[in-house]
Amino acid sequence: MGQVLMPDSRRVEVCMKILGFTFIALAASCIHATPIPGLLSTGSSAPGSPDPAWTYFYSPVPVSTGFVFTPAFTTSTSDFPFPLWLANDTNSRWISPQPGYGHSTGVFGDPQGYYYFVLPFTLGSGYVASTGTFTFRVSTDNALNSIILNGTYLGTPFYGSNDFSAWTGPITAPPGTLIPGLNQLAVIVYNWPTPGNASVAWNPHSWNPAGVRVEILSSYIDYSPPSGGVIPEPATIWMAGAGLTLLGLWKSRRKRGSTL
C-alpha cells in the first residue's frame, strides 16, 4: 500500500511556517550584545604621555560654549601627587592637564577653576543607541562638580566631593542616554585655590594639581552587523530559507513519485 502523502498546498504551507520560524530565529541572532565601542577608562597610555581618548578644557569660571579641547595626559607616577592619589592599576589610571608634577618636572599644580575632562566616542552603523548602558566610577582632585552624558546629568551633581584616595559608588548611564553618531561623556572637576595662593617647590602642602580617574566597570549595547558583516543580512536569510524550502519540496515530490 502506498504511503499517504500530504497535499502539495498543505506541504507548502508547512514549509513556509518552518521558514518563518527559521527566519525569526536567524534574524534574532543578527542582533547581539557587545561592549560599547570607544568607551574607555582614563589612562590607557603610558604614564607621562597623552591619553589617546580623553581630552580636557580649562576655564576659570563655568562655561557652556567656546570649548577648545586638548589631550589630557596619563599622569606620571614617578613623583607627586602619588602616593596620595588612589594607586593606578591595569584597569584605569589618573589623567591630568600636565604629564606630571613635583620636583622631577618642576610643575607643582594647576590654576584654580573648572576642568572639563571629556571622552568622545562614536556609535556607527549597526549599533542600537537606545539600548546602550554602562556603569563606571570616578575619583577626582579636587572637587567632582558634575558628570554629563550628551547633555544629560547622570544623577545629582556631586559638588564638594574630593576624596582622591577612594572611588565614588558605581554610576550608571541608563538606556536612552546614548545617541547615534558622536557621544560625549564629560566629567567636570573644580580645582580649588592653591593653598597660600602659590605653589612653591619647598612646600608640598601648597602643590595643587587637578586630575580625574574614570573606570568603566561594564557596558552593553545591541549590535546588528550591516550588510557585509559576518552574520548574514535578512535578505540573505530569506534567500537561503527559500532555497531550503524548494529543496524540501523537490525531495518530497521525488519521494511521492517513488511510492505511488
Image (tube, rainbow, N blue to C red):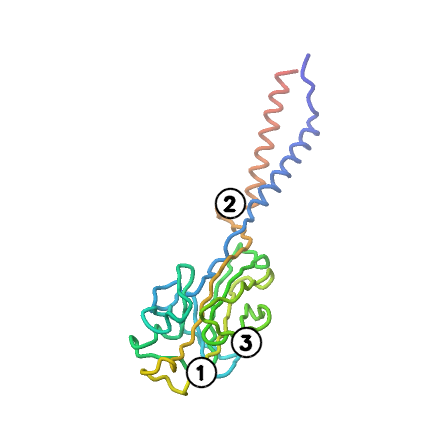
Asked if the residue at tag 2 contacts the one at tag 3, i.e. Cβ–Cβ closer than 8 Å, the answer is no
Q: Amino acid at mark 1?
A: Gln
Mark 3–mark 2 Cα distance, whole angstroms, equals 46 Å
Tag 3, which secondary structure? loop
Q: Which-is-in-front pick, marks 3 and 2? A: 3
Task: Name the residue beneath numbered marker 1.
Answer: 112
Up the image or down, 131 lies above or below 77; here it is above
Mark 2–mark 1 Cα distance, whole angstroms, equals 52 Å
Task: Name the residue beneath numbered marker 3.
Answer: 159
Q: Amino acid at mark 3?
A: Tyr
User: In the rendered image, which quarter is residue 242 located in?
Assistant: top right
Point out the tag, 1 or 3, that comes first from the N-terminus: 1
Task: Name the residue beneath numbered marker 2.
Answer: 231
Residue 80 position, x and y percent, is 35, 74
Tag 1, which secondary structure? loop
Residue 230 position, x and y percent, is 48, 45
Asked if the residue at tag 1 contacts the one at tag 2, i.e. Cβ–Cβ closer than 8 Å, the answer is no
Up the image or down, 161 lies above or below 40; here it is below
